[in-house]
Image (cartoon, grey):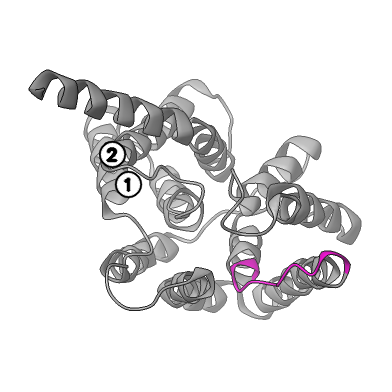
Amino acid sequence: MTRGLWDRETVALMLLAAAMPLVVTWLLATGTAGLVRLIFVLVAAGLWHLAFMLARAQPPSFSGAFTALAITVLAPVDLGLVPMLLGISFGVVAGELAFGGWGRNVVNPATVAITFLGFGFPAASWPDLPVQLGWSVAAVAAIGGVTGVMSWRVVAAAAVVLAAGCWGLALEMPVLTAAAVVLVLLVCDPVASAGTTLGRWLYGLLYGALVLLFAVGWDGAPPVQAAVSAALIASLAAPLLDEIAISLWLAWRKRLG
């Protein structure tokens, strides 16, 4: 994202393009049921974008499709229509549209929706992500990194921590798969993640560390729920990490005179 003409919708379209390997892999694994679920979430999120366009002249965004994709893949799987609609509505409205749309939000709307569903309906079952979905993350991260819509620093920092966890804690494959999928769908959101160079390194390290902490200390937590919770906390800490990075840079500049 360093050359050419870029705007919000170009970035959103590039995020969708980067996510295509994961989308295809997930649909091949889930079949018709997965396709129906994706269409349902797309329609629900799209209706809220349409409502805000009519009520507040707020233009809809292709980011809503990316949000719907993340909710479809990561949200609890055995919820009824009403709870699912409540979760989608809360995430899209409270996490994005109420702030003026994608680009002005503080936390990723899909993270808000999935967290709401997880804690609001604790009896719901979390998805068991197929292992091949984790391998597709490499292609997603590569496309996102080359195009500049995903920070390679965030991915690298998280990967280093998770690799250390594999060596020291022998993390199971479901934990790594969930952590990898959440990394590219939620954590690497260019709006909700850290914006400074050092902040991005710290942000990725924090996410990876939280995944390890939850994997070890949160007994009985499904891997997806633990990874989403780590993404939420890391996203909330992103402004603080940027503030730390800027303060360190200013102190270094003052030392140089």
Under tag 2, what secondary structure? helix
160 lies above or below 127:
above
Residue type at tag 1: Val
Residue that badge 2 annotates: 201
In terms of depth relative to the viewer, which is nearer, 170 or 183?
Answer: 183
Residue that badge 1 annotates: 154
- Disc 1 packing (10 Å; few <14; some 14–19; many ≥20): many
Q: Position of residue 75 (x, y in %)?
A: 67, 53
Assess whether mark 2 and mark 1 are in contact (beta carbons under 8 angstroms). yes
In terms of depth relative to the viewer, which is nearer, 129 or 39?
Answer: 39
Query: Would residue 59 be counted in the magenta stretch?
Result: yes
Residue at image coords 46%, 77%: 20
Query: Would residue 141 be counted in the magenta stretch?
Result: no
Locate the N terminus and report the quarter of the image it occupies: bottom left
- Disc 2 packing (10 Å; few <14; some 14–19; many ≥20): many
Left or right: 228 as drawn, with respect to 256: right
Residue 122 can be seen, yes or no: no
Q: Main secondary structure of the magenta part?
A: loop
Give the magenta-colored segment's residue range.
55-64
Under tag 1, what secondary structure? helix
Left or right: 82 as drawn, with respect to 104: right
Residue 220 image-quadrant placement: top right
